Image (cartoon, rainbow, N blue to C red):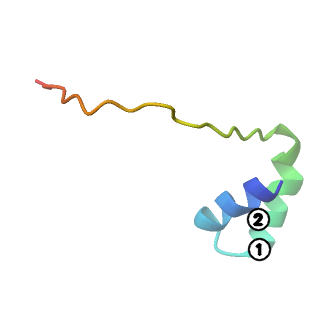
Amino acid sequence: MDNFRKIAKKFYPSEEEIRRALERSGMRVQTLAMTIDYISGKLVKES
């Protein structure tokens, strides 16, 4: 849940609101950590 708290600090103004959100939906939250192996510099022409 530490990852959730770190992300929540960006969107919730107080620790109290973060705590309430965790109580309401903490068991349904999933976080994923991804490592990007390769990013191309190819430009895409959008219409």
Query: Which quadrant would the N terminus be assigned to in this image?
Result: bottom right
Q: Nearer the viewer, residue 8 or 42?
A: 42
User: Circle 2 — which element?
Assistant: helix
Q: Is residue 7 left or right of residue 39?
A: right
What's the amino acid at mark 2? Ile
Residue displayed at 76% across by 65% down: 18
Where's residue 46, x and y in %? 15, 26
Which residue in the structure is indicated by mark 1?
15
Residue nearest the viewer, comparing 45 with 25? 45
Q: Answer few, some or many: residues within 10 Å of disc 1's Cα (few below 14, many 20 plus, some between 14 and 19).
A: few
| In the image, residue 20 above or below residue 38 | below
Judged left or right of residue 32, residue 45 is left
Q: Residue at x 60, y 63 (%)?
A: 11
Q: Looking at the image, is 44 positioned above or below residue 14?
A: above
**In 3D space, how far apart are the residues under numbered discs 1 and 2 (Cα atoms)?**
5 Å
Q: Which mark is residue 32?
A: none
Left or right: 11 with respect to 6? left
**Amino acid residing under circle 1:** Glu
* Kind of element beneath mark 1: helix
Q: Is residue 47 left or right of residue 14?
A: left
Please report contact status of discs 1 and 2: CB closer than 8 Å, yes or no.
yes
- Badge 2 is on which residue? 18
**Image x and y of residue 5, in percent:** 75, 61
6 up-or-down from 33: above or below: below
Circle 2 Cα neighbour tier, 10 Å, few/some/many (<14 / 14–19 / ≥20): many
Front-lying residue, 39 or 26: 39
Q: Quadrant of residue 31?
A: top right
Q: Residue at left 51%, top 32%?
A: 37
Quarter occupied by residue 47: top left
Q: Position of residue 26 (x, y in %)?
A: 84, 48
The residue positioned 76% from the left and 38% from the top of the image is 30
